[in-house]
């Protein structure tokens, strides 16, 4: 493909190294302004901090610094008002801002790039953006926890079946079940907080890869931008994307947790379970079947986990085997992170809405808890505690009783005493005290257990730990 020549170089921003213009396809594959325009606020903030430092270090005159600062503020206003013309010809957000600055204040705009490179510039902008995204996601996770805790307190004594292998295992309470997701969300917040803490080092001043010969003050720019410290090694500063990978890993785990709750909502809404009902606000109908009420919000939360998993794998693949320092491959870092942050925020908002919207059916939940011989463990524990059987023998005896109850077609609480005693003579009528589902859950008073009083105490503790 023939490239048209342009005297003086393809673009003033590139300088004099090139005499021809890039091919159209090169321009298209090279440009990132289509997505990195989201970094505009961070790019301006980092440029303002850099400009102020250059003036303070007497690298830039106060007059030039004032002109640059004023121009950057004007650009901020233009973007906020939707008046800024983003150009693919100028590749990325950095060159778009710099080119507009040159239009506004003339050649002095070129002094802003003293002692920095787009390599440290984008690394700084990206960290700033992700730091803000993590803060927003933490708030969203906290709102989900608040919704779960509210519902857990309201249903601390609502009996339901607990499952293992999706088979009825033991009675629990709905409040206890919901508090499990509060703990998951708490770990999600912890992972994001760890990621935020580690990313909060400032690359600005690392320049392209080797630092700079200008007498800059990297601690000043780091402090001005709210970083804890400057990045210690200039090579690492521009080539590190651990913070983005770590964020994607934390986001993928959080989405996985949401998908588990979403799956339970889908199951619980079904006619076969009938444990809860979602309103019109979080369900959709069918174009052909008039009776349908589909839990589509939950299904989409469940599905969107794949996007976050894919984003993590994509960036891990981009970074695999990259030599130091910066490679253009790393331009592919932002889209997965942007999409993951957007998707997780949407899923959190939808899940919080569903938790507040869902209406449990306590009678249906209790009836389900009575099926499947869920108090069999209580029977085995009674045989150990009252009849003084070794647990292994108690386990076998209980299994025989369950088999007989299944043959009779009755729950354990309805088994005739003589049937129980025919299997184990040590059984007395007091055994029926532990075969009722309410008494079963009430007996689970160990720390973290499902007894209603424990659930209420756990909800209070969770409110203090996570919402205080």
Image (cartoon, rainbow, N blue to C red):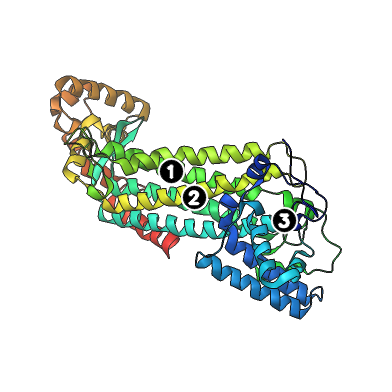
Between discs 2 and 3, the one toward the N terminus: 3
Q: Position of residue 190 (x, y in %)?
A: 52, 53
In this rendered view, identify the residue nearer to me: 57 or 88.
88
Identify residue for label 1.
Answer: 257
In this rendered view, identify the residue nearer to me: 11 or 51.
11
Q: Which mark is residue 135?
A: none
Identify residue for label 3.
Answer: 118
Q: Position of residue 122 (x, y in %)?
A: 67, 55
Element type at mark 1: helix
Is the C-beta separation of discs 2 and 1 under 8 Å?
yes
Q: Is residue 274 visible?
A: yes
Which quarter of the rendering shows the N terminus? Answer: top right
Identify residue for label 2.
Answer: 188
Q: Is residue 453 visible?
A: no
Q: Is residue 15 left or right of residue 273?
A: right
User: Height in image: 13 above or below 21?
Assistant: below
Q: Residues within 10 Å of mark 3 (few under 14, many from 20)?
A: some
Between discs 1 and 3, the one toward the N terminus: 3
Q: Position of residue 341 (x, y in %)?
A: 50, 50
Element type at mark 2: helix
């Amino acid at each position: 493909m023939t490239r048209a020549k342009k005297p003086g170089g393809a673009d003033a921003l590139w300088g004099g190294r090139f005499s021809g213009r890039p091919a159209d396809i090169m321009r298209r594959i090279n440009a990132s302004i289509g997505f990195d325009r989201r970094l505009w606020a961070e790019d301006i903030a980092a440029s303002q901090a850099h400009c102020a430092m250059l003036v303070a270090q007497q690298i830039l005159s106060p007059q030039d610094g004032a002109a640059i600062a004023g121009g950057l503020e004007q650009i901020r206003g233009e973007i906020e008002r939707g008046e800024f013309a983003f150009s693919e010809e100028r590749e990325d957000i950095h060159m778009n801002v710099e080119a507009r600055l040159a239009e506004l204040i003339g050649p002095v705009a070129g002094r802003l790039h003293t002692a920095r490179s787009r390599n440290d510039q984008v690394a700084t902008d990206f960290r700033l953006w992700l730091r803000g995204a993590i803060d927003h996601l933490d708030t969203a996770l906290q709102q989900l926890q608040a919704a779960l805790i509210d519902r857990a307190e309201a249903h601390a004594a609502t009996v339901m079946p607990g499952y293992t292998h999706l088979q009825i295992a033991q009675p629990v309470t709905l409040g206890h079940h919901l508090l499990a997701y509060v703990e998951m969300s708490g770990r999600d917040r912890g992972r994001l907080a760890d990621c935020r803490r580690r990313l909060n080092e400032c690359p600005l001043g690392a320049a392209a890869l080797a630092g700079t010969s200008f007498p800059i003050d990297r601690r000043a720019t780091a402090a001005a931008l709210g970083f804890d410290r400057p990045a210690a090694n200039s090579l690492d500063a521009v080539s590190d994307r651990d913070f983005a990978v770590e964020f994607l890993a934390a986001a993928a785990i959080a989405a996985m947790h949401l998908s588990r709750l979403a799956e339970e909502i889908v199951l619980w809404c079904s006619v076969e379970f009938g444990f809860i009902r979602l309103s019109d606000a979080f369900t959709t109908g069918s174009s052909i079947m008039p009776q349908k009420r589909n839990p589509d919000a939950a299904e989409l939360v469940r599905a969107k986990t794949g996007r976050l998993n894919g984003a993590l794998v994509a960036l891990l693949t981009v970074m695999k085997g990259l030599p130091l320092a910066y490679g253009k491959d790393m331009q592919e870092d932002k889209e997965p992170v942007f999409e993951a942050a957007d998707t997780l925020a949407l899923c959190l908002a939808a899940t919080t809405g569903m938790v507040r919207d869902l209406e449990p059916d306590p009678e249906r939940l209790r009836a389900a808890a009575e099926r499947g011989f869920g108090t069999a463990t209580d029977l085995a524990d009674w045989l150990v505690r009252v009849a003084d059987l070794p647990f292994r023998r108690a386990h076998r005896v209980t299994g025989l009783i369950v088999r007989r109850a299944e043959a009779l077609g009755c729950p354990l609480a309805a088994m005739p005493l003589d049937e129980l005693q025919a299997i184990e003579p040590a059984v007395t009528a007091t055994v029926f005290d532990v075969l009722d589902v309410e008494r079963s859950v009430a007996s689970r008073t160990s720390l973290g257990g499902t007894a209603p009083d424990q659930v209420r105490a756990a909800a209070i503790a969770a409110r203090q730990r996570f919402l205080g």
